[in-house]
Amino acid sequence: MIEKALKGSSVYWGWIIFLLCLIGAGMMAYLYQLKVGLGITGMSRDISWGVYIAQFTYFVGVAAGGVMVVIPKYLHHYTKYGKIVVFGEFLAIAAVVMCLLFIVVDIGQPMRMLNVVLHPTPHSMLFYDMIVLNGYLLLNIICGYNTLLADKKGVPCPGWVKPFIYISIPWAISIHTVTAFLYAGLPGRHFWLTAIMAPRFLASAFAAGPALLIMILLFVRKVTKFDPGDEALQTIAKTVCYAMIANLFFMGCEFFTAFYSQIPGHMHTLEYLFAGLDGYGNLVPFMRAAIVIGLFGVFLLLVPRIRRNPKGLALACASVFLATWIDKGVGLVIGGFIPNPFETITEYHPTLPEITIAAAIWGVGGLIVTILYKVAISVREEQARV
Amino acid sequence: MSMDRRKFLKAAGLTTLVGLGGKGVFELLRPGAVEAEMAHESHGHDKHHEQEAGPKVRWAMLIDVMALNKEKIEKIVHTCHYLHNVPNWGDPKNEIKWIWEDEYEHVFPDSYNEYNHILEGLPFLLLCNHCDNPPCVRVCPVQATFKRPDGLVAQDYHRCIGCRFCMAACPYGSRSFNWLDPRVQLKKEMAHGRKLNKQFPTRMRGVVEKCNFCVERLAEGKQPGCVEAVPDVMFFGNLADPNSNVRKILKERISLRRKLELGTKPSVFYLI
Amino acid sequence: MYDSGKVIIGLAVFACIFLFPFLYNRGTAAPQPKPSLDTPAIKALSEKKCVENTRFMITTHMQFLNDWRDQALREGNRWYVNSEGKKVWISLQNTCIKCHSNKKEFCDKCHNYAGVEPYCWDCHYDPNGSKL
Ligand code: SF4
Ligand code: SF4
Ligand code: SF4
């Protein structure tokens, strides 16, 4: 099937080459990082996780979001999703690969990665994260590949794949829950120490993942003969809308607890992120924008006329994606380190090599999505012709 | 076990006689005593026995804040960083430190008293607390940081993968990461007359490090380097032994520990 | 669609390139190195004996050192009792290297031959290395 990825227009190839360039640049930057050390990044003793882990966290969400098309299809037999489930699974594959890469580039001794397996440590959340992420990757490869194969032959998915599909549903929830537990169980980091971390992660995941899926599918519909179906898109859009509302609601809950209780430690990070603290406020414009853009996205999705218009839908999804990205892919991880355990503030400025490496991982994700989608779409187009 | 204990006390008595202990109450362990304790612990399959006994050794450090001054602080920090070849990067971004000074309001950020400034001017020394319930150990995915039976929170640089989860988990900011190759900086400093302690290795880039309670010196029956440098300011001993030097002092003096509300149970006490 | 013939040719070319170094080196093995053990400390020994017998040290020193490392660092056990009942202080820096102070000869010769690069020296000191 993979040979389908080798036939494409010049625009297709241009895009592939662009991604390869991005990846190449990132690889150079990574070699530099391997040689010199993580000191080439903007991270410091106080901000010991940066862009890499923040992006990791965000894309675990995107990966988990794919389940939002799997559940209706397989648990509720919502047939309108029949044609697009495989796209959700392929998106999850790309996102999980990105997550794993973000971890690899973040750790100081990548050659010792296998230690996690050699010295399994059940009291560490990172140990479980490794299991669930790799497991989720495998599940999605199994499910995605077989679904597509069956589609190609025009037969239903083989029976032995079904259990894997059902397992993949709670598994998707688990990857983001465990990722939230990485943060939510640390004493002394007030911003992260919250029981609604996991629910909030899931809410933003179920908004961000499907939003990205809609954007890609809208694009696909425009440039290929494959039509995912209006109704399917509209249903996903509703999922995005409700999930985003839940996400914003949870965020409001955080604000309430912190500011009504008036406990300084709980307020500080929120103050830093949204208003500035002791004269520091690098992230303030971004975080405020995230709220505004997020609300704007929800508004667009709530108005049926806008939602049904492809342009309006695309704009709404882009808003949701961007808002959750700023909130979770930037503010959440960086904010947790500010103020530091001494109640002083060190800010974080990512460096060019760091951003290049992160961009390359985006590139890898893009490449995987492009190739897998190309294959899937070619199969769909063939079917349409038959 | 009872024999161990007698030997232990005898060693303590001896060292007091020889006058090795700071105030005459430091129980210096004879070489091998720590090992004996630990061997006992690790072979302690006898459950009943263990429950009765509890840990026999839990190392703790006391710092007399009132007796500290600039000179002594400098001596302490220099001793520790010399003994363990801790590079001095000179910038907060790459900074590595095992023991350092900070102000009251940063050390006890939740205990600010706006009507009494007695504590504020005092110098506080920060180092790893060797917590009895250490979150850093809990989160480490490879057990590169682990708690030894004698309460010491140790760090295995051979195994650390540099994920920095422990840095996020430590509520005391005790840990430093080698963002760059520490030897590069050490070489630079050596060109300016810095001496290397060839008995103790350096670290490599990409691993986390922190105060190790001088585990390499304890193994030889010595006191931690900082304590030895200022025996009238810092005290080191066995918190599990009701008759130890540290327990005696803790009975008499007012002491503080950092962020007790987090349940980590620090083993570093500040005497006021 | 696609041509299986071409794929097979491609695979064959790849295999040839991949195997080239192995095929090329066949039968031309470099002579086994014979590191010299002479150091002042060893010369001064009345009985030239390592912690365990030579055969054992040559074949098993990797596991042996791993074990020593874990004993000293993780178990807090600094004494090793060898097969003759003698006690030895467990330390790479302060025991092994005290005798084997000729890293270039003693360590590097075989390691280079075997193409392995242990990371001991990233942290521990080469006793004669002038630089760190
Ligand atoms: S002070 Fe920090 S590093 Fe030290 S034991 Fe406690 S949690 Fe771990
Ligand atoms: S940085 Fe090292 S010690 Fe810290 S959690 Fe990761 S592996 Fe463990
Ligand atoms: S106990 Fe040892 S390692 Fe810790 S601060 Fe004192 S000298 Fe440094």
Image (tube, helix red, strand yellow):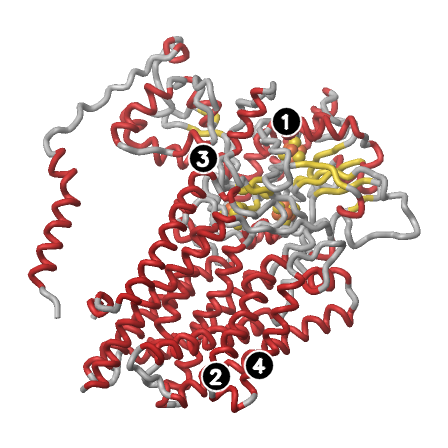
Q: Write down the residue under mark 1.
A: B222
Disc number at residue A298? Answer: 4
Please indicate whether residue B147 sits to the left or right of residue C67 in the image.
Answer: right
Chain of the residue where label 4 is placed in the rendered structure: A
| Quarter of the rendering containing residue B110 | bottom right
Where residue A102 sits: x, y (%)? Answer: 45, 56
Compute the Cα span from label 2 to label 3.
Answer: 57 Å
Residue B169: tell me if it is visible: yes
Compute the Cα span from label 2 to label 4.
Answer: 10 Å
* Amino acid marked by disc 4: Val
SS at circle 3: helix
Q: Write down the residue under mark 3.
A: C69
* Amino acid marked by disc 2: Ala
Q: Write down the residue under mark 2.
A: A237
Where residue B33 sits: x, y (%)? Answer: 59, 32
Q: Say whether disc 2 or disc 4 marks the residue closer to the N-terminus.
A: 2
Which label lies toward us, 3 or 4? 4
Q: Residues within 10 Å of mark 4 (few under 14, many from 20)?
A: many
Q: Residues within 10 Å of mark 1 (few under 14, many from 20)?
A: some
SS at circle 1: loop
